[in-house]
Amino acid sequence: MVLEILELLNESQAMHSHEIQDFRQGPDFYYVRICVSLRNNTILSVRQYVAEEDYSYSYHWQDKDGVLIMRWDNAPHHKGIETYPNHKHIGDRVVPSTEITLKDVL
């Protein structure tokens, strides 16, 4: 799965470069965190945890000064959202979002 992420990044016209910041793997899980520099001078932080019975993701997109543009995630902290736990942050607002993939983001 991590190789699929790297292949997707390498094939993307949006990516300038990437750095794997953390990677852990066990017999039934993996965790990866990647910092992606995009060609439009923004940054995308990718985080995925995948296990047999658990899946979490966060795609945090920010400008070069670190200001959030948008973040998609499924952290269970916005229980009032009808698409719980999936949601997205647009600036200070939290709005519904379906589960999203890195391919969708790119």
Image (cartoon, grey):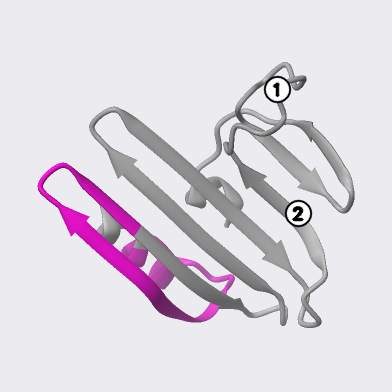
Estimate the spatial distance between the alpha carbons at disc 1 and disc 2, rounded to whole Å.
19 Å
SS label for mark 1: loop
Q: In which quadrant is the C terminus drawn?
A: bottom right
Report the side of 67 relative to 32 (left or right): right
> x, y percentage for residue 74?
57, 36
Residue located farthest toward the right when viewing the structure as drawn:
92
Indicate which label's residue lies in the foreground, 1 or 2.
1
On the image, numbered disc 2 is attached to which residue? 70
In screen coordinates, is 101 left or right of 79? left
Q: In the image, is residue 75 above or below residue 84?
A: below
Give the residue drawn at x 52%, y 74%.
35
Q: Amino acid at mark 2?
A: Met
x, y percentage for residue 64?
76, 82
Residue 77 lies within the magenta run: no
Residue depicted at x 46% and y 79%: 18
Look at label 1 and name its amino acid. Answer: Lys
* 42, above or below 11, in the image: below
The crowding category of the residue bearing disc 2, from other C-alpha atoms within 10 Å (few below 14, some 14 to 19, many at least 20), is: some
- On the image, which quarter does residue 32 sit in? bottom left
Q: Which residues are magenta?
A: 6-31
Viewer-nearest residue: 74 or 61 = 74
Pick the front one: 14 or 51: 51
Which residue is drawn at the image coordinates 82% and 38% (left, top)? 94
Residue 65 % position (x, y): 81, 82
Q: Residue 23: where, in percent of width, then height?
A: 30, 67
Q: Which quadrant holds residue 87?
A: top right
Q: Which residue is mark 1?
A: 79
Secondary structure at badge 2 equals: strand
Q: Quadrant of residue 14?
A: bottom right
